[in-house]
Amino acid sequence: MAPPPLSVRSVQEDPFKTLFDFSLKEAKKGDVASMYSVGRSYYSGVAVPRDYAKALSWFQKAAAKGHVEAQYHTGLIYNLGQGVPENDVIAKEWFEKAAAKGNSDAQAQLSSVLRFSKTVAHDIPRAVALQEKAAASGNPEHLFSLANAYRFGLSFPNDVPKAVVLFEKLANLSVKPGEDKKYIQWAWGTLGSIFLRGESGTPRDLVKAVDYLSRAAKVQDGQAQYLLASLYSTGLGVEKDEKTAANWMFLAATNKWRDAQSDWGAWLVNGKAGYKDPKEAVVWFKKAAEQRSPVAAYNLGILYESGIGTEKNLEEAKSWYKKAADEGHAKAKEALKRLGG
């Protein structure tokens, strides 16, 4: 006798909806973890339409029973004003509860409230301590935020050398396959820029600058690609190599880095790109000018005035000179005056 056919789940069945239905059933019975799960579904719009009011209701139920993630999300909804009026006073109360239990996200958000809130009294020393605790958890986002706060003095003591230590810790952090690496990659680009310029109390180190910029450039960091192009073009910190410089400049331009788009346009005019193509240069200058690059707008004025790469058009030239002049470009102001614009 043949065995009965195996039971298989229909391809039409939504596993997330199945999980939601189960969680909702358990939540109504009083299961705290299920209350939080239902809240997360409503908060993120997974399996059910996003509904912040319902999310908050379930988060509050779980939070009242001590669920730390629910406490954090209750605070977050009030902090961001998601479906309710923004209220940092209530947000702080819930962040305090979750932070006290070691939740690094709550510690970071509470730090932000104590620094930037308009309705909660600021407490910078405690905010610093909280952000330090959040970063100590090893969370890349919190580590990056702490490093940036010290670098730029964002309500923290301005301490670039301390920021560098934190960025380097982050830059060499190990992550599991599939985990988000964006904060680590951002740290590479940031360190490259800091070591290249020698920011506030951090000595210039071209070896480290090239190392970190190369790491960032390989993961499509437009600024890092642009800075590498400049280094290879001048031979600063690396052996001068115009072909490599052109490759990095083109990649930076395609990654929409404004100054790279402008410089690539100039290189297409003067041949530094490895060939000359003034017509293509006009395209790149316009891309940069759309991002309010005064240099690109000025160069477009020159091309339209002289008829290079495009038909000569003095009115168009004046229009671009004016855009550059409005951004404070001195030579554009002189050109505009010369053309009677």
Image: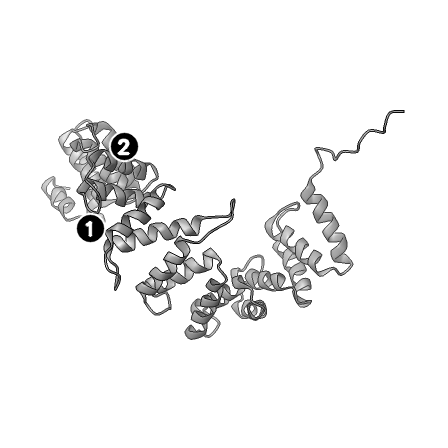
- Judging depth in this view, the residue of 234 and 148 nearest the camera is 234
- In the drawing, does residue 266 fall left or right of residue 52? left
Element type at mark 1: loop
Residue 274, horizontal then vertical, whole percent: 20, 29
- Up-down: is 239 above or below 138? above
| In front: label 2 or label 1 | 2
Q: How is the image coloured?
A: one colour
Q: Among all residues in the image, which is located at the extreme top?
A: 1
Quarter of the image with the N terminus in it: top right
Residue 243 appears in view? yes
- Judging depth in this view, the residue of 83 and 158 nearest the camera is 158
Disc marking residue 194: none
Tag 1: residue type?
Gly
Identify the residue under disc 1.
Answer: 328
- In the drawing, does residue 44 fall left or right of residue 1? left
Dot 2 or dot 1, earlier in sequence: 2
Badge 1 crowding class, 10 Å Cα cut-off, few under 14, some 14 to 19, many 20 or more, is: few
Look at the numbered discs 2 and 1 and tell me whether their residues touch, using CB distance below 8 Å.
Answer: no
Residue 304 appears in view? no
Tag 2: residue type?
Val
Q: Among all residues in the image, which is located at the extreme right?
A: 1
Identify the residue under disc 2.
Answer: 283
- Up-down: is 219 above or below 138? above
Q: Among all residues in the image, which is located at the extreme left?
A: 338
- In the drawing, does residue 47 fall left or right of residue 264? right
